[in-house]
Image (cartoon, grey):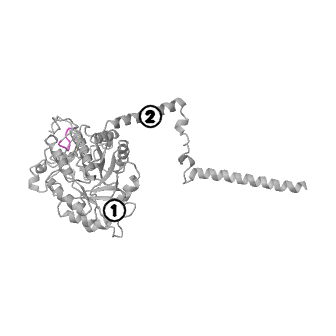
């Protein structure tokens, strides 16, 4: 009788041990390959101590935490020195510069002198590339020198200058991955660092989509999808709350007129089968207004607004300040955003030595203030600044310094290198005050 009881007992113990072994095995397997969050990733559960900290002495961990706290406190103190950012004030920003130290060569600072389209005229002007660091493709010389857009210290300095100017959003010049402008290298890989540093300074990032080779309505959808999937959840990614209650990204589309309105409509009209509208990649798309006839094309295409980009008053219909009131009226009538572009001046004779007619003297800041005043009179939705650092065309508000060399450079004298940042800051406050009045 005792023998019959022992046998089921042994069987039961064996079964329990087998279940325990399987449980341990599965637990180990899940911990290695599970796609699910572990308790350490769930809010409320402490994260396991890192290997780095496990190897540290307690006093070293305390020192590391203290150093981080000091760093955070230092940043907060720095931010308190700046005015609050105005997110209705956007600045066009370029990341195409490079130098031998960071990039192995000069990029864009050695910009070629472009020939005039008329061969006879072209013969009367110099051609060839600039030779940095003393001879660069610009009429002014940057206070940061011939910098690299990849240099973290340069991006940090730029963000500080932007915050000094109370600029809330940078519209970064953008080409798709592995694509570039005619004189530079691919720059998409710079954007992640730009986002990180911008966020540190509470600055938002929008995208200024350039006319890359082969741009059409199909690959525009693909590229917008790429941008939103990669950066859409980043806290520095600029989004705007529309009148319909949607929180959407905003894209400036440079030289949008190069694609006809029928093609744009396939992307931007709600009625089209392959439209981007009402998808997770919907956005506010802003077209470049150049000629007066472009207004109707932009409307037909399904864009959400217009901007004027060019800093030369009178260069185009869109950039002519006396036209801004009528452009604003057209936009209001058709539920479009109006974003006039203002600039501190214009001179591009370092790269287009024959283009004197489009030069606009800065007049020690008066040209810029007149442009800002004209923009405010039109009651715009946003104001865009051409530019923070487009040095080739002399539209930069970035700090410049006097430079003595064989090449003759302009400068901001008798004012300080920061004069255009200070003017921007002043008008950012005025713009903020005016916006509040318009909403009353």
341 to the left or right of 270? left
Name the residue at 53% across, 36% down.
Answer: 53
Residue with the most extreme front position: 440
Q: Nearer the viewer, residue 23 or 238?
A: 238
Name the residue at 8% across, 50% down.
Answer: 124
20 to the left or right of 98? right
Name the residue at 18% across, 56% down.
Answer: 324
Is residue 257 visible to us here?
no
**Disc 1, disc 2: CB below 8 Å?**
no
401 versus 372 height, above or below = above
Residue pointed to by mark 1: 219
104 to the left or right of 403? right
Residue 389, image x, y percentages: 24, 45
429 to the left or right of 407? right
Compare marks 1 and 2 and give the one earlier in the sequence: 2
Q: Nearer the viewer, residue 290 or 108?
A: 290
187 versus 76 height, above or below = below
Crowd around label 1: few <14 · some 14–19 · many ≥20 (10 Å): few
Is residue 282 visible to us here?
yes
Residue 179, image x, y percentages: 31, 55
Residue pointed to by mark 2: 69
**Which of the two discs, 1 and 2, sits closer to the camera?**
2
Residue 43, image x, y percentages: 53, 47
101 versus 246 height, above or below = above
Where's the N terminus, which quadrant? bottom right
Magenta residues? Answer: 134-139
């Amino acid at each position: 009788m005792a023998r019959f009881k022992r046998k089921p007992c042994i069987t039961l113990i064996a079964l329990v041990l087998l279940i325990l072994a399987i449980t341990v095995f599965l637990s180990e397997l899940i911990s290695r390959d599970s796609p699910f969050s572990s308790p350490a990733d769930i809010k409320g559960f402490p994260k396991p101590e890192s290997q780095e900290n496990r190897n540290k002495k307690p006093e070293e961990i305390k020192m590391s935490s203290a150093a981080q706290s000091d760093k955070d406190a230092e940043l907060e103190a720095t931010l308190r020195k700046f005015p609050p950012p105005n997110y209705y004030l956007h600045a066009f920003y370029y990341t195409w510069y490079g130098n031998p130290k960071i990039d192995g060569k000069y990029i864009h600072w050695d910009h070629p002198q472009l020939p005039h389209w008329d061969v006879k005229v072209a013969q009367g002007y110099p051609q060839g590339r600039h030779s940095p660091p003393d001879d660069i493709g610009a009429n002014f010389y940057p206070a940061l020198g011939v910098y690299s857009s990849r240099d973290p210290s340069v991006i940090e300095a730029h963000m500080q200058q932007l915050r000094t100017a109370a600029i809330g959003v940078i519209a970064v010049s953008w080409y798709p991955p592995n694509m570039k402008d005619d004189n530079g290298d691919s720059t998409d890989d710079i954007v992640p660092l730009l986002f990180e540093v911008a966020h540190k300074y509470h600055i938002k990032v929008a995208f200024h989509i350039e006319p890359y080779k082969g741009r059409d309505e199909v690959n525009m959808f693909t590229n917008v999808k790429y941008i939103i999937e990669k950066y859409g959840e980043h806290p520095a990614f600029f989004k705007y709350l529309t009148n319909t209650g949607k929180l959407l990204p905003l894209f400036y589309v440079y030289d949008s007129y190069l694609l006809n309105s029928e093609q744009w409509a396939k992307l931007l009209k709600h009625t089209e089968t392959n439209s981007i509208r009402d998808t997770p990649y919907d956005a506010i798309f802003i077209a470049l207004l150049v000629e007066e006839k472009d207004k109707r094309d932009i409307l037909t295409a399904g864009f959400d607004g217009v901007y004027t980009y060019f800093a030369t008053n009178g260069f185009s219909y869109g950039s002519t300040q006396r036209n801004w009131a009528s452009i604003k009226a057209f936009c209001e009538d058709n539920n479009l955003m109006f974003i006039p572009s203002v600039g501190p001046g214009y001179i591009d004779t370092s790269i287009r030595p024959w283009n004197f007619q489009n030069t606009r003297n800065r007049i020690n800041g008066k040209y810029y203030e007149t442009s800002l005043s004209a923009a405010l009179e039109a009651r715009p939705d946003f104001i865009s600044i051409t530019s923070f650092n487009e040095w080739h065309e002399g539209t930069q508000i970035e700090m410049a310094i006097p430079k003595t060399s064989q090449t003759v450079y302009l400068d901001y004298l008798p004012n300080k290198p920061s004069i255009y940042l200070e003017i921007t800051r002043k008008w950012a406050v005025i713009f903020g005050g005016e916006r509040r009045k318009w909403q009353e």
